[in-house]
């Protein structure tokens, strides 16, 4: 199935469209919270927009609830949007028709590839829209809204890089968040094709994400432009998570393609 056909199928489903809108709106609501913080603090100097981003956790007083609402439960949203089709194909029997038409390898690979691409582009557009609007709204801002690093600059190179080069670092974090979103979307579709059971698929995919979200030095620290992780911890964490998710996706792809041969 082509990416265009997959996208059309998603966009013709009202439930899926609703959750797409949710993922687009949450970062926009964060802009509203930043504006509210600015006016409640009665500041005269606008915040520097280069340092503002959804992943920079620029808001105060809300315990970053919008950020948690989006990223903690991201696999659930992405499964509803991009993974449900795999379960629906199994339930309706369309899976067998599609496999007979294009072959099992192409079906499985196409499903996981399209899930990755759609989830990647969705989160990329959502976060880029947030960052772009912040640049326009606070284009005259000069006040830097970030907390000081926990360690001296020479011991915290990652924080220093983010502080000195906020725009490229924020863009890099947006790209990384989009890639990880695409990977967990593809993994969710892989589990959906292998297991066919919604409860198992949602539970396993969510745990595979949430465990690393709340872990010390995990995804939330890596996907922060002004992280207090050292360079070594950041590099190790990023490589381990990226290679781990890639390995899980590869295993699911191979296992589902070879499942008929094994049985």
Image (cartoon, rainbow, N blue to C red):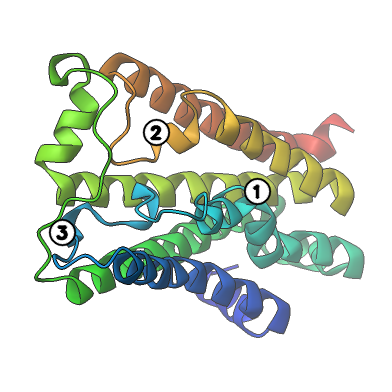
**Nearer to us: label 2 or label 1:** 2
Quarter of the view holding residue 165: top left
In percent of the image, x 9 and y 70: which residue is there? 140
Tell me the quarter of the image containing the N terminus. bottom right
Residue contact between numbered discs 3 and 2, judged by CB atoms under 8 Å: no
Q: Earlier in the sequence, mark 1 or mark 3?
A: 3
- Residue 63 visible, this angle: yes
Q: Residues within 10 Å of mark 1 (few under 14, many from 20)?
A: some
The secondary structure type at the circle numbered 2 is helix
Residue pointed to by mark 1: 105
Left or right, 231 with reference to 15: left
- N-term-proximal mark, 3 vs 2: 3
Q: Which residue is mark 3?
A: 48
Q: Tell me where residue 56 appears, x and y as whole percent.
A: 34, 48
Measure the alpha-carbon separation of dots 3 and 2.
22 Å
Residue 241: image x %, image y %?
49, 28
Location of residue 124 (image quadrant): bottom left
Q: Position of residue 229 (x, y in %)?
A: 34, 23
């Amino acid at each position: 199935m082509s990416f265009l056909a997959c996208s059309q199928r998603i966009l013709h489903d009202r439930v899926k469209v609703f959750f797409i809108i949710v993922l687009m709106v949450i970062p926009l609501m964060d802009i509203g919270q930043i504006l509210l913080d600015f006016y409640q603090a009665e500041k005269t100097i606008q915040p520097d927009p280069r340092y503002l981003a959804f992943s920079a956790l620029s808001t105060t007083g809300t315990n970053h609830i919008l950020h948690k609402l989006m990223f903690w439960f991201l696999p659930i949203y992405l499964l509803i949007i991009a993974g449900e089709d795999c379960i629906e194909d199994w339930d309706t029997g369309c899976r067998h028709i599609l496999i007979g038409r294009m072959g099992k390898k192409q079906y499985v690979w196409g499903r996981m590839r399209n899930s990755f691409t759609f989830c990647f582009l969705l989160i990329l557009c959502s976060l880029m829209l947030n960052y772009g609007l912040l640049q326009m709204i606070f284009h005259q801002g000069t006040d830097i809204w970030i907390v000081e690093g926990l360690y001296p600059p020479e011991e915290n190179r990652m924080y220093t890089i983010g502080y000195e080069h906020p725009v490229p670092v924020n863009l890099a974090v947006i790209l990384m968040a989009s890639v990880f979103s695409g990977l967990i979307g593809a993994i969710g579709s892989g589990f959906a094709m292998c297991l066919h059971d919604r409860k198992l698929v949602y539970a396993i995919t969510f745990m595979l994400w949430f465990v690393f979200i709340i872990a010390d030095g995990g995804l939330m620290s890596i996907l922060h432009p002004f992280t207090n992780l050292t360079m070594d911890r950041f590099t190790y964490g990023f490589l381990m998570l990226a290679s781990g998710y890639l390995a899980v996706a590869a295993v699911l792809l191979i296992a589902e393609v070879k499942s008929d041969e094994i049985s």
